[in-house]
Image: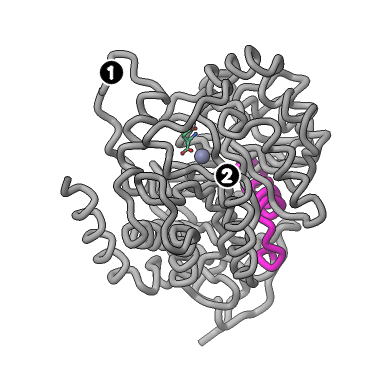
């Protein structure tokens, strides 16, 4: 068999690969993308919140449906859903996932016998599917900026700070090359200022990823202004040691000073375009943020889509629709929209996920025979990948030296799908 050269897109850009028998089937190798934001259980309600439930349906009415669904998930169904989700992520070209995990306790709020049980279900699903996991146990304490108690449906999410720190410690003890553990503050409305300060002080000596939902909805911006006297990002930058370890999830509603402040802090923004569109959040100020040199990556969040291509495409399309221009995500030295989007989502993703080995070892091979790539060159490959058609072009996915997807299918595709069908039957039964 004649050997064929291949081309690799790495964090540093394109390199011409050598003659490589193992990759002769594909000429196109791309570093795998980190998925910066996931609530795994929400995969199971994708498509089930698209019927009007209220004349003024909004993020907040969606949240009620989501809470009702969250109330039914058990450790077993959590595992089955996460296996299905992570297999889909690997098939679509994500090689690391940051799990923003707050479904900690039993439905009535009592901890499981092992308080880490729901977290461990996610870790087991990541291990069994072969995706890298950055597990971010979430601190969730109050039901609003006014400090009100958690509602009945939120009780599963809550911790005292001591109980949270015990969970964090038990999870960090299980960390390994494929499992990194950081922290998450659910949002400013769910974590009182004093608790935020105490948690950050408790982990101050140990650098780790810190993720937070912020400024996603206008209602949150208004409440923050009313109760803390500043906009959410403005308040956070003034009151927390935000630096390159931090990831601000959504950060949709920003004034220019906040854009500049995020960039100056070195934090990464996790933009979740398909979820933000689905929930009616608003549009991230991408042009201003890119012009300022900001770091960003993408997340699939509620998993109405599990495809990095679709996140990147809609990130650009949202901007085109409001500016009535084309090719927004470009720079002086980079006229290719697809390449700029992929390169920056990769760099920002690696920065935010805390997985140092991911950059060297994790990659996908694209289907060399796909019509969408016919005659492709390095110059147009990523534009074609991001913008042409909607067939998944990922043929193989390799993580940490293991081929977990071959011929477009996860190595346990069928068994995982069967287990997921059973879990869904149980979840939808009542
Ligand atoms: C979440 N999701 O935690 O799953 C949230 C909704 C909230 C998004 N923000 C709940 N997309 O923010 O209170
Ligand atoms: Zn989220």
Between discs 2 and 1, the one toward the N terminus: 1
Which of the numbered marks, if any, corresponds to residue 54? 1
- Magenta span: 336-359
Question: Which residue is at a point 56% across and 51% down the rendered structure image?
Answer: 137
* 59 sits left or right of 2 in the view: left
Q: Where is residue 298 in the image (x, y as percent from the top left)?
A: 58, 44
* 366 sits left or right of 83 in the view: right
* 71 sits left or right of 14 in the view: left
Which of the numbered marks, if any, corresponds to residue 345? none
- Residue at label 2? 160
Q: How crowded is mark 1: few (under 14 residues within 10 Å), some or many (20 or more)?
A: few
Question: Which residue is at a point 24% across and 54% down the rendered structure image?
Answer: 424
Q: Position of residue 4 (x, y in %)?
A: 58, 77
Question: Which residue is at a point 74% across and 23% down the rendered structure image?
Answer: 234
The Cα–Cα distance between marks 2 and 1, rounded to whole angstroms, is 34 Å
Residue that lies at the very extreme toward the bottom in this rendered image? 1
As for residue 340 lying within the magenta part, the answer is: yes
Question: Which residue is at a point 58% across and 52% down the rendered structure image?
Answer: 163
In the rendered view, tell whether residue 87 sits above or below residue 291.
below
Q: Where is residue 202 in the image (x, y as percent from the top left)?
A: 75, 50
CB at mark 1 closer than 8 A to ligand 1?
no
* Local SS, label 2: loop
Q: Position of residue 58 (x, y in %)?
A: 39, 21
């Amino acid at each position: 068999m004649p050997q064929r050269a291949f081309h690799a897109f790495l964090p540093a850009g394109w390199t011409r690969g050598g003659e490589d028998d193992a990759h002769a089937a594909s000429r196109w190798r791309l570093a795998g993308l980190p998925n910066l934001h996931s609530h795994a259980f929400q995969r199971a309600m994708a498509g089930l919140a698209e019927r009007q439930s209220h004349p003024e349906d909004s993020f907040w009415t969606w949240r009620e449906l989501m809470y009702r669904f969250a109330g039914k998930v058990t450790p077993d169904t959590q595992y089955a859903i996460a296996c299905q989700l992570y297999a889909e992520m690997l098939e679509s070209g994500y090689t690391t996932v940051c799990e923003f995990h707050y479904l900690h306790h039993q439905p009535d709020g009592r901890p499981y016998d092992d308080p880490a049980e729901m977290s461990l279900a996610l870790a087991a699903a990541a291990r069994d599917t072969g995706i890298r996991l950055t597990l971010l146990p979430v601190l969730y304490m109050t039901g609003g900026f006014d400090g009100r108690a958690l509602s009945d449906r939120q009780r599963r999410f809550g911790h005292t700070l001591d109980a949270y720190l015990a969970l964090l410690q038990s999870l960090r003890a299980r960390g390994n090359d494929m499992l990194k553990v950081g922290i998450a503050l659910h949002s400013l409305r769910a974590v009182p200022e004093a608790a935020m300060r105490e948690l950050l002080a408790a982990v101050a000596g140990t650098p780790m990823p810190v993720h937070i939902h912020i400024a996603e909805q206008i209602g949150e911006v208004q409440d923050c202004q009313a109760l803390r006297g500043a906009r959410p990002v403005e308040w956070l930058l003034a009151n927390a040691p935000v630096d390159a370890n931090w990831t601000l999830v959504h950060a949709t509603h920003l004034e220019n000073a906040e854009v500049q402040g995020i960039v100056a802090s070195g934090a990464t923004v996790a933009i979740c375009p398909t979820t933000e569109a689905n929930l009616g959040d608003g549009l991230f100020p991408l042009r201003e943020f890119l012009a300022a040199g900001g770091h960003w990556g993408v997340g699939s969040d509620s998993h109405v889509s599990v495809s990095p291509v679709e996140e990147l495409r809609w990130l650009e399309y949202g901007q085109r629709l409001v500016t009535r221009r084309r090719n927004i995500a470009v720079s002086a030295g980079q006229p290719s929209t697809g390449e700029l989007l992929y390169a920056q989502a990769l760099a920002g993703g690696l920065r935010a996920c805390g997985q140092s080995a991911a950059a060297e070892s994790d990659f996908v091979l694209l289907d060399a025979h796909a019509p969408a790539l016919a005659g492709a060159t390095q110059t147009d490959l990523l534009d074609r990948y991001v913008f042409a058609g909607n067939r998944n072009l990922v043929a193989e996915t390799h993580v940490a030296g293991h081929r977990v997807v071959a011929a477009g299918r996860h190595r346990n595709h069928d068994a995982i799908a069967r287990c997921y069908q059973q879990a869904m039957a149980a979840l939808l039964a009542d």
